[in-house]
Image: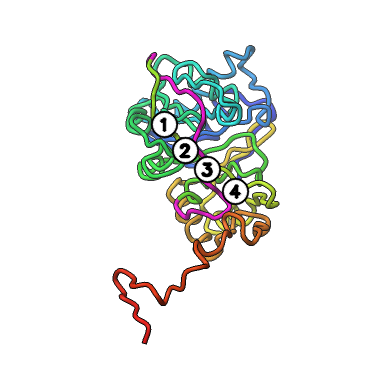
Amino acid sequence: MGLSSNKHPGKKDLANAFASVGLQEGDVVYLSTQLYGLGPLSDALSRAEYLESIYDSLNVVIGSSGTLVVPTFTQQVGRFGLPFNLEETESLTGVFGEYLRKRADSVRSLHPVFSVAAVGPCANEICNDVSAVAFGAESAFDRLVRIGAKAVCIGFDYYSGHIVSLMHLVETAFAVPYYYNKLVSAPVFANGVQIVKPFVINVKYLGMHCAFDYNRYIDTLADNDDICTASIGRGEIHAVEARAMFDTGVSLLKTDIYAFLDQPPQFREGEIPMDGPPDTEINFEDRNWVGFHLVRQ
């Protein structure tokens, strides 16, 4: 059940809303924000005060022992091959993500397209020495699940997909066939030094009418009472345990590999990923296969 609030809340109202969705001292929070969906705060008269109010309200609840993590995605790097500078490249995930990224105490994970920024005691554990695969093992997102984070979104429509903000980690674990692994073709810099190694992102195949549908995933979480919701200002806050989100996604994809899509992709016979047998001109019965030693009788 959601917590009601007036249309022009203040910092205290926002802190109460964060607490009402289950956040508490020491939590690791992965926060996605769409602040126009929240609307004005009564005690914030400028953009700077507004962003400080969001941070302060959450910090009141999770305390100095808590860690705040935000997405700082830079899809412009992956799409246009622009240089990525860990310390300088701006993200496309909203003003609050940029606010946290620019804080002096912020740590950012090294991935040219799908990075996160974090402030708090667990920031280094989440962000440092991550893998080069966006959502794979030892990515920041993998660590959020293993560390027991809570995924929180504020200001988004219920079925927008942000309630299941870690779904791409589940897809990567299942090697869903509508994605391929794409190497990022862009120069990457950190601490003034170019990082020469391959970075990988998951990209949907084009032309296969492959569109996400988050309803089933979100409804399943709701049926399991895994979504906590509070009304605040013009919108709502939703919170989900990262482990519950991951485990529910695993359960859905075990049953239906296309559970996160509106319909199965329209793959084409003979084209990747349905490119057929690798060699149709050799009779497999004429081969001695390692481990089987098939012999024609």
Q: As shown in the figure, which amino acid type bears the numbered disc 4?
A: Met
Q: Which mark is residue 200?
A: 2
Q: Position of residue 147 (x, y in %)?
A: 35, 41
Q: Is residue 184 above or below residue 188?
A: below
The mark lying in front, picked from 4 and 3, is: 3
What residue is shown with label 4?
1
Distance (Cα) linking label 1 and label 4: 22 Å
The mark lying in front, picked from 1 and 2, is: 2
Disc 4 is placed on an element classified as: loop
Q: Give the range drawn in magenta.
A: 173-192
What residue is shown with label 3?
202
Residue found farthest to the bottom = 297
Q: As shown in the figure, which amino acid type bears the numbered disc 1?
A: Ile
Residue displayed at 55% across by 24% down: 91
* Pointers 3 and 2 in contact (C-beta within 8 Å): yes
Q: As shown in the figure, which amino acid type bears the numbered disc 2?
A: Val
Disc 1 is placed on an element classified as: helix
Q: Specify the quadrant that holds the C terminus.
A: bottom left
